[in-house]
Structures are given as C-alpha cells and as structure tokens.
Image (cartoon, helix red, strand yellow):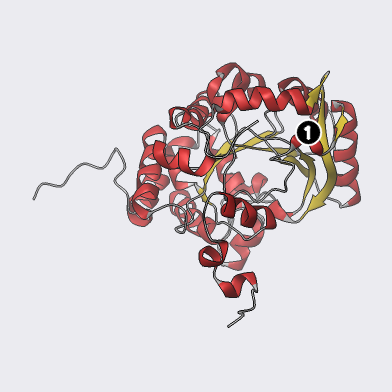
Amino acid sequence: MTLRHAIRALFELCEVEGEDLTLKSLCSAFGIEVPRELKELEDLPPRIALAIAYTNYDLRPLLREAAFEFLVEKKTCKVPLVEEESP
Amino acid sequence: MIRRGDRFDPIDVAKQTERMVCRNGARKYTAFYATGVYGGIATGYVVGCCLRCFFCWTDFSRDFPEAYGSYYTAEEACENIVRAARKWRVNKARISGGEPTLCRKHLLELLELLEEREEVKLFILETNGILFGADESYVKDIAGLKRVYVRVSLKAGEPEAFEARTGASREFFELPFRAVKALLDHNVRFHVAAMTDPRIMPAEERRRLIERLAEIDEFLAANLEEEVCDPYEGALVRMQFYGIDPIEFFGRKSLDVTSRD
C-alpha cells in the first residue's frame, strides 16, 4: 500500500473513530500498518496525527492529494479542483 | 447580558464575559479532572463563552458565568492540570467547558507554562474560532508554541443558520472561517470540527460547509470531524429555550422518557 493509499484509508477510518483511539490501535483494529512517515505520531488520535503530519511541508502535497481523492469519492461534494466533465 | 431573541455581537459578548471571568490574569474555572476523550486527557473546565449554541453540551456556567467558578492564576491552573495528568496517567491536556480564548493573557501565560512541563505532551485548544478570526495576531501568538494543537468547531455552513443556532448575528459568520485560514497560514497544528448532525444541519448546508473548507484547503475538508448532538442536560434545556422540543429531537427512547399514555 502506498502512503497516499494509506492516508486515503485513514481518512475513511477517521469517519469511524478519529478522536478517541490512537492511530496505532485504530490501524491495528482494521489490519492496516501505520505508515512509516506517521510512526512517531502513532500514539495520537488519528485525526490529530494526520493534522500534525500536514504541517510537514514535505508530506503536505501527498496528504492533499489523498484528501482530494477522499473528498471526491466520499464527501459527495464538488471541490474547486474538480473540472466539469464535458457531456 | 443577552436577552431572549437578541441577535448579539459575539466580540462584545466576549468582552462583557471577560469582565466576569478574568481578573488580573486569572480566570474562572469550576474543576480540574481527566476524562476519556482523546484517549485520556487532563481538563481544566472554564466558565463563559461568546456564543449561545442551543446544542451546547456544557453546564449552565456558560450562560451564567458570574455565578460559577473560582479564579485561578495561570500558575495555579497549570499546576492543577499537571496534577490531573499525573493522577490519571495521561499526557494530553485541554481547557474545556467555556471558550478558552477568552482571557487572552491568562491563556497565553498558561500555554507558556505548559510548554515547560514534561507531563503534558499535547495541549488541545478547543475553540469556536470567533476571537482567532477577529484578531490574527492572537493566532500568531500561539503559532510558535510547540505543544499546542487547535480544534476549531464550526457551528454552521451559512450565515442565517449561524445566527439561528448560536444567537450571534449573521454578520459574524465569517470569523471562524477566517480563524481557519489564519491557522493554516501560520502553520499551526489544527483540525476543523463542525456540528453537522443531520438533525441540526441540512444535507445541502453540510455540503456547502465542506466545499467552503475545501476552497480554503482540501485537506481540512477531508480531515473534518463531524460532531453529533448528545442529550446532555444543558442541551435539553437550551433547546426548549430556542423553541425546539428535545423529546421530538432526540426521540423518547433515547431520553428514557416514560410515556404517560
């Protein structure tokens, strides 16, 4: 699983439980490995871990990409980067 | 301070409330404890807020701050929070109950003190974003603090709904969004929460709120924490005040109300 896919999966898991479990325990419950890049944040709640990772400018583009995919698929909203498909 | 039906200026209410809950750098708290949210967190419970959301879970110290709590200096609050963290073996802390950004001097002193304490690794600042949105320098003040993490809670996705739910005038609807933008610009560690409970926020408004966040930054929208309204005593009473029947809202079963029929 690439980091982008893992982040995308984490956004989904956060819909189930984003605040009260740790990233480590949530990943373990769903059989997902904590991405290496988030390892040092694994004892934090997953939503908080993701938000802290986002302050890292090296990880930011990838997180934004995963966020974009998640929004289009799951949040059923039109985000600014989506271009209208021609009929 | 606020009469029924008034649409108020939340900045003005913040100032009026501060006159009741802040004194020479001290702030009114009612308790220090730890609770299970965030996987365990030490909590200082403050009184007073600048919004009057009908779904708010807090006790009546929000509405009558003059009648509740005792003053604690930043040093005293810090010691009590650290003591609670030690006692319950947790390494996260927060201020909850009222709005923590009231009494700026107190909050900044407290945050500075907590930066020095090994017991607290993360301080979660839960805010409605009104004061951060009104004054970007406040965001700048916390931006350098390495243990601070902010959770901004949005109440509505459109001005009319903001007014109806919070009691604050719709012209202040933008402030929490400005806070979000400022937090992002200053690279503060934070996420956004919103009361998107479908019993409170229609689907179309939720969609607009998420789009609005995505316009600021897609990541914030994807990482949105969607809040659900729970039947706490404070919320039940406030709903009645706002003309909402809590039995109808939550359902008889969830309130454990016995039918007289």
Relative to B129, residue A29 above or below: below
Label 1 chain ID: B
Going by the image, does B19 lie left or right of B189?
right
Quadrant of res B134: top right
Give x and y (percent) for residue B67: 80, 38
Horizontal and vertical percent for residue A20? Answer: 66, 56
Which amino acid is tagged 1? Glu
B150 on left or right of B244: right
Out of B57 and B221, give the one closest to the viewer.
B57
Name the quarter where the C terminus of chain B is drawn: bottom right
Quarter where residue B110 is shown = top right
Q: Residue at x 47, y 52 (%)?
A: B196
Please name whichever residue, B241 or A42, is drawn nearer the observer in this view of the structure. B241
Q: Is residue B30 visible?
A: yes
Whole-percent x, y for residue B173 in the image: 45, 32
Residue B96 placement (x, y as % from top left)? 72, 42
Q: Is residue B154 visible?
A: no
Q: Characterize the local packing of mark 1: few (<14), some (14-19) or many (20 or more) Cα atoms within 10 angstroms.
A: some
